[in-house]
Amino acid sequence: MLPTPDLSHLTSQDYRNVYEPSEDTFLLLDSLEEDQEYIKQLKPKICLEIGSGSGCVITFLGQIVGKNSVYITTDINPEAAKITQKTGKQNNIKIDAINTDLVNGILPRLENSIDIICFNPPYVITESSDINSSLIAASWAGGIKGREVTDRVLPYIPKLLAPGGSFYLLLIQDNKPQEIVEIMESYNLKYQLIKKRKAGIEQQFVLKFTKPL
Amino acid sequence: MRLITHNMLQCHVKGCTKDNFPLKLEEIEIEELEAEFNADFIKSMLNRLDWKALAQTTFSLGIAQLPEEMPEELSDEMLEQLHHILLEIDITSGRMVCQGCNHVYPIRNGIPNMLLTESEV
Ligand SMILES: C[S@@+](CC[C@H](N)C(=O)[O-])C[C@H]1O[C@@H](n2cnc3c(N)ncnc32)[C@H](O)[C@@H]1O
Ligand SMILES: [Zn+2]
């Protein structure tokens, strides 16, 4: 078992504006851990987390992959970007956090360049108007089907992934994961279910999509 | 933000397709970092770099004078220099200006802000 990243530098004050690692976060960590042999043999050069929040996931990925990779993150919430960078520092992983919407600002430059992408999106079904209604609402409010934010980023994933690279995506049953599988397969990505767990009444999944070599 | 990451960022204002990369760094503050040197890692990163943009940026900052094109063979000395440029120069504040449309992307607390307003997207 790999240790979870040290988050002792964060306080409840920080979690007022930034998503506190929760069951979904930990399911993503468990998935990366379970898949670590695959991840290591990829020898990732560039890893990206979209919507990094506390930075827990990218830091954990950094612990698996090691020093010989570049870790970049995006978040629409500037507070999250700051905290992500701090979490990296606390755990000795250099993270370059970017304050942006999804993957804006790295395309087309990073086409075919990213080996691992992770995303634990805002996935709760809400009114569309709830999305981004506050810093913290942006962390969970997903609009229609809880999918509005996720769906916007999907077309960029096959562009960004390096050949052989993978995208790890957390979803819940309400998001209709099967539909996402169909979308991603239409982009020629290979699908695999990595983990499935019930958290309260919420059925959570981690899906992995891989770009052919 | 290290220079390696600066090398990956470009302007994404709607309709800005010319001279949108690299973004020009202005009024920046730099902090030097210390990173472990690994020649193989630097070599393996080369095909993910935009060399011309790196040469242009380091020249305009007065940090280095890299050859305009990536050399076929890189000496150990050159690899160490690249290591320093890419991984040990952290830009803590300043701004990035698009040479195509003049859009300004600020950098604060080491974090570039690539967000645009609705009308720019
Ligand atoms: C469910 S939280 C996950 C946080 C963290 N990755 C984790 O697993 O604990 C979703 C994150 O996505 C960010 N986010 C929401 N919409 C975004 C967007 N359009 N672009 C970038 N990040 C976004 C939120 O600010 C939040 O940090
Ligand atoms: Zn521009």
Image: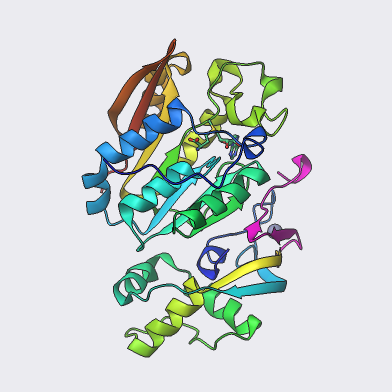
State yes or no: residue A161 in magenta: no
Residue at 64 percent across and 62 percent down: it is B20
Front residue (pair B95, B55): B95
Quadrant that contains the N terminus of chain A: top left
Quarter of the image for residue B83 reads bottom left
Q: Is residue A183 left or right of residue B5?
A: left
In the rendered image, is residue B12 in sight?
Answer: yes
Front residue (pair B27, A165): B27
Counting from the top left corner in percent of width and height, residue A94 is at 47, 60
State yes or no: residue B115 in magenta: yes
In the rendered image, is residue A185 in sight?
Answer: no
Front residue (pair A4, B101): A4
Residue at 55 percent across and 70 percent down: it is B3
Counting from the top left corner in percent of width and height, residue A31 is at 32, 34
Q: In this view, does A165 lie above or below A149?
A: below
For the magenta stretch, what is the residue range? B98-121
**Residue furthest out toward the top:** A201
Q: In this view, does A116 lie to the left or right of B58?
A: left
Counting from the top left corner in percent of width and height, residue A148 is at 58, 25
Q: In this view, does B73 lie above or below A168?
A: below
Residue at 68 percent across and 71 percent down: it is B25
- How is the rendered protein coloured? rainbow
Q: In this view, does B52 lie above or below B115?
A: below
Label count reads 0
Counting from the top left corner in percent of width and height, residue A51 is at 54, 40
Q: Is residue B116 above or below residue B37?
A: above
Residue at 50 percent across and 84 percent down: it is B68
- Dividing the image into four quarters, tell me where ligand 1 lies: top right
